Amino acid sequence: MRVWLRRNRIGSCLFGVTLLAACSAAPAPPSPDSSTTPASESVAGLTPVTMQVDRDMAQAPFDEPRQALVPAGWTISVWARMPKPRLATWTPDGALLISVPSAGEVVRLQPAEDAPTSSVLIEGLDQPHGLTFAGNSLYVAESDQVDVYDYADGKAVNRRTIAPGLPDANSEDLRGSYHHALKSVVVGRDGAVYFSIGSRGNITADDREADPPRATIMRVPPGGGPAQAFATGVRNGTGLAFAPDGSLWTAVNNRDNVANPQTGEPDPEYVGAHPPESLARVTPGRELGWPYCNPDGGPANLPLIRDVQTNADGSRMDCALLPPIEQSFGSHAAPLGMSFTDGVLPTPYASGALVGVHGSWNREPPRAPEVSFFAWRDGGLGDQQTLVGGFQSGDGSRWGRPVAAVTGPDGAVYITDDYADAVYRLAPPSR
């Protein structure tokens, strides 16, 4: 694993207590159908800043100045370069772990005053993606199983598999066809383990009858045991995180090429705006509807409507009986990693969900990548706000695509980008 690291100081020591000042007023949420924003424009309380890059890490796309949109007074820098970083979590001893599915590795970045040091914590895995800690136990979601390790002295040892035999492209019944093999994992306060299993394809309804069922959030009970479906109809719930009150939430990539209910055809105008991506509370037995029902409208409390291609007469599922989806992103936004922050960042970002939004791959104009923020209020999430933007120009060209964002022990936000092969450090103003 080749990793480029900063050679200059990154500010105050990462393990010191950093006092943070309040920043500008909360940005207004974009409309569900907003698309592109040139980095040179200031929108909704965000201002353009030049990405800080040390010369040792100034390979493309940072071989020319890049601007990002951040809250007023905040700074953003390239903290490390590494190929295709995905999800991230902080260790009990203050290192940042990053999954690299393409290399089969979990990489450990140890912060230091001058430059973080890099080492491969675990290698030889099958597309590791989700990472989380419960005390000193590290949970890793591979494409075909979920493992737990003892973490001590900067090492992961004593591997145990708690959810074997999960579907991926090597599964005999799938014969190499699997579009959403990457999985995420979190652990509840009671010790139960939750992980995602994405759908095999866009509208592959047989996923619901598979063993284990795909398009689900699965649960392993405290103390271990067979995994059982906890929520169903979750096409690709890559974002998975616990809120400050202990509730579980998922950010979902919904289907493509959905037909217009009025015409029965997937015309480009309708497809470009539908369906919104979901951000939903996960409760026992919850049904999110895929592939028979799709969320509609938004940004909040979205009803589910019948999919006229898969549920033409409504006999497969009565969408009107399903509870509304709590929050949403724009259509085809591709939300990926999700985390919650509480009491680390300054207001108005003190408590809420951080989501890496990858941006669309098949929409015109393209849905722009960003880091989104949803404020946590009264046990629910407010509308989507952009915390970091500017990765896409007005012509749809991009230089970056965020995957995940997590707050660090220094009060900064660390953002992975598997398109620019970078890890960013987004820092609020200090007192």
Image (cartoon, rainbow, N blue to C red):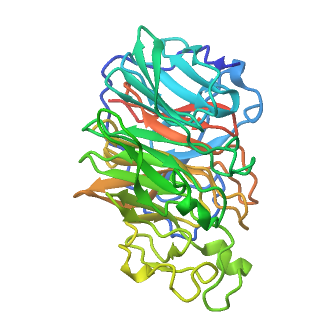
Q: Is residue 143 above or below residue 218?
A: above
The foreground one among 23 and 391 is 391
75 left or right, relative to 340: right
Q: Is residue 157 above or below residue 340?
A: above
Please count the marks in the image.
0
Q: Position of residue 35 (x, y in %)?
A: 63, 65
Residue at (61%, 74%) from the top-left corner?
A: 273
Q: Position of residue 149 (x, y in %)?
A: 44, 21
Q: Quadrant of residue 407?
A: top left
Residue at (66%, 63%) from the top-left corner?
A: 202
Residue at (58%, 60%) from the top-left corner?
A: 207
The foreground one among 310 and 324 is 310
* The N terminus: image quadrant: top right
The foreground one among 361 and 266 is 266
Q: Is residue 368 above or below residue 76?
A: below
Judged from this view, the residue extending furthest toward the top is 153
Q: Position of residue 138 (x, y in %)?
A: 42, 25
The foreground one among 128 and 400 is 128
181 left or right, relative to 327: right
113 left or right, relative to 375: right
Q: Position of residue 8 (x, y in %)?
A: 58, 15
Q: Quadrant of residue 133?
A: top left
* The C terminus: image quadrant: top left
Q: Is residue 25 visible?
A: no
Q: Is residue 257 visible?
A: yes
Judged from this view, the residue extending furthest toward the bottom is 262
